[in-house]
């Protein structure tokens, strides 16, 4: 991956496991325990991960200075503070705000989104009508509303199976057996019910679907 990140965190325990996790994911991490050298080091980085509670200059001050010096540089704030006022203050300059404690997968996902948004990594976004499907992150966003669409596990498995066969007509048997791993019995309504719920979440008008097309007497397909 070879993407350089600047990570500013004074907590040694948190800093060590975050650095270790990000290194395992292929990032090059410059870890600093204060923001004194932030402006200097940020010049060679693609993203800054910035804790709020720091010795000396606090994270808000460091973040504001960084954004002024590097307006296009993504900043991800980390904080144990959960009040809305703190989040609003941070989001005046930061591009995202993650509260502690957090799971490393969530941190990695947010980093990847910010890097993609800034053009620092290649995008693998699939555009389907009004939807943006972020396949590596298992995220679907309605571009017209800006809202993320949340699917159940089984709904996403069905959708992803059909995406792997984009533009191809799939029988009900193929979809059911590919997702459930069990033989399909003629007349079983399980798949049909899941498709209906999927359309309610994905389609502009579920009664006139543009994404998941019914092929009468055969099955379904997602139009390329």
Image (spheres, helix red, strand yellow):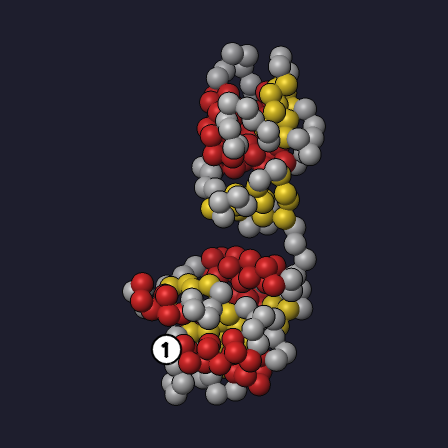
Q: Tag 1: Cα neighbours inside 10 Å, few (<14), some, or many (≥20)?
A: some
Q: Report which residue position mark 1 lands on.
A: 53
127 with respect to 196 (left or right)? right
Tell me the residue at 53%/43% (across/down): 144
Query: What residue is shown at x 61% (from left), y 37% (from top)?
Result: 129
Up-down relation of residue 120 to residue 37 (above or below): above
Figure label count: 1
Which quadrant of the figure has residue 80?
bottom left
Q: Residue furthest front?
A: 144
Point out residue 169 in the picture as x, y percentages from the top left corner.
68, 24
Where is 116 relative to 19, above or below? Answer: above
Between residue 8 and residue 69, name the one nearer to us: 69
Query: Based on the displayed image, in which of its 4 quarters is residue 52 positioned?
Result: bottom left
**Nearest the eye: 166 or 158:** 166
Would residue 159 be visible to someone looking at this image?
Answer: yes
Above or below, 65 against 187 in this view is: below
How far from the left and from the top, in percent, is residue 89? 37, 70
Query: Which residue is at 46% across, 71% downward?
Result: 93
Which residue is painted at 57% across and 41% down in the image? 131
Q: Position of residue 206 (x, y in %)?
A: 50, 27
Image quadrant where one finds the N terminus: bottom right
Quarter in which the C terminus is drawn:
top right
Residue 12 visible within the image: no
Q: Position of residue 104 (x, y in %)?
A: 47, 61
């Amino acid at each position: 991956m070879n993407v350089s990140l600047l990570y500013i965190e004074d907590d040694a325990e948190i800093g060590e496991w975050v650095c270790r996790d990000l290194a395992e994911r292929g990032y090059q991490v410059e870890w600093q325990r204060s923001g004194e050298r932030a402006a200097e080091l940020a010049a060679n980085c693609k993203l800054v991960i910035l804790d709020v509670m720091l010795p000396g200059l606090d994270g808000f001050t460091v973040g504001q200075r960084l954004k002024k010096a590097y307006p296009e540089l993504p900043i991800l704030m980390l904080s144990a503070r959960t009040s809305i006022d703190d989040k609003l203050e941070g989001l005046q300059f930061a591009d995202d705000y993650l509260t502690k404690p957090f799971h490393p997968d969530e941190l990695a996902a947010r980093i990847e989104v910010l890097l993609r948004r800034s053009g620092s990594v290649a995008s693998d976004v699939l555009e389907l009508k009004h939807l943006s499907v972020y396949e590596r992150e298992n995220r679907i966003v309605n571009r017209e509303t800006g809202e993320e669409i949340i699917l159940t596990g089984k709904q996403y498995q069905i959708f992803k199976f059909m995406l792997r066969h984009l533009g191809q007509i799939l029988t009900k048997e193929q979809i059911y057996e590919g997702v459930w791993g069990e033989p399909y019995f003629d007349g079983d309504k399980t798949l049909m019910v899941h498709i209906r719920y999927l359309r309610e979440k994905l389609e502009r008008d579920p009664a006139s679907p543009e994404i998941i097309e019914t092929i009468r007497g055969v099955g379904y397909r997602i139009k390329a």
